[in-house]
Amino acid sequence: MNNQDTNQTVAPVTDNQTTPVTPVADNKPAEKADSTQGTTASTPVAPAVPDSVKLDLSADQAEMVQDLLSNFVYAYRSDREVDCKRELVRRDQVGKYPYIAEAPDPSIINPAYDWINKKWYSKSGSTSLPEIAQSVANLNKRSTEQDQAALANGQQMQMITKQLGNQMTMMKQMQQTLTILAKGSQAQPTAPTVNTNTNGGNN
């Protein structure tokens, strides 16, 4: 028996099945390791993903796969229940409610499809992150303007209050002056009356 016979085990093969040959681990002592492998030997390596996969299918299975590949495609569903979901659908349904062929722009937050205007939009109100940033900047600017307007209004109200206070003081002073004048006119003696009757006089 040679080395190849000991390194491989073969399972029994039936008529409709092909069984792969499974290699058995080699028990030979390892050759002298490279001095640079000491630190990298323990690092796990991700398995390589194959570019293609070979399937062993029956005629019915092959026909079903061919039917799926030729008659079904991925599309994006957007309706009252689902805002945006990728689904496998028949080709003739794409472009009809609720399936759209083109994917929404990745910058759109919470995308939903507008079937009237035939375009994706953001269900949260903002179409994209730059628009949200612009909205925040606009809100900050508006807030600053409102703060400045409120400050100006407060200063104007202080001036009006001060002017009203001055006017009230002047009104009180005028009222006091009028009261003094009224009292003064009542305290003055009345002038004596001159008798102008000449009938009883000596001539």
Image (cartoon, rainbow, N blue to C red):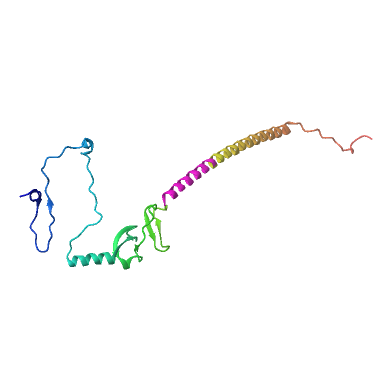
The total of numbered circles placed on residues is 0
Q: Which quadrant of the structure image shows residue 203?
A: top right
The answer to which of 6 and 96 lies nearer the viewer is 6
The answer to which of 76 and 17 lies nearer the viewer is 17
Residue 35 as seen in the image, left or right of residue 97: left
In the rendered image, the vertical position of residue 13 relative to residue 184, given as above or below: below
Q: Position of residue 71 (x, y in %)?
A: 28, 67
SS assignment for the magenta stretch, majority:
helix
- Residue drawn at x 54%, y 39% is 151
The residue most toward the left is: 1
Q: Which quadrant of the structure image shows residue 91?
A: bottom left
In the rendered image, the vertical position of residue 202 relative to residue 14, given as above or below: above
In the rendered image, the vertical position of residue 100 relative to residue 158, given as above or below: below
Q: Position of residue 178 (x, y in %)?
A: 69, 35
Q: Is residue 100 magenta?
A: no
The residue most toward the front is: 2
Q: Which quadrant of the structure image shows residue 34?
A: top left
Task: Give the magenta range.
Answer: 128-148
Q: Position of residue 201 (x, y in %)?
A: 90, 35
In the rendered image, the vertical position of residue 71 relative to residue 123, given as above or below: below
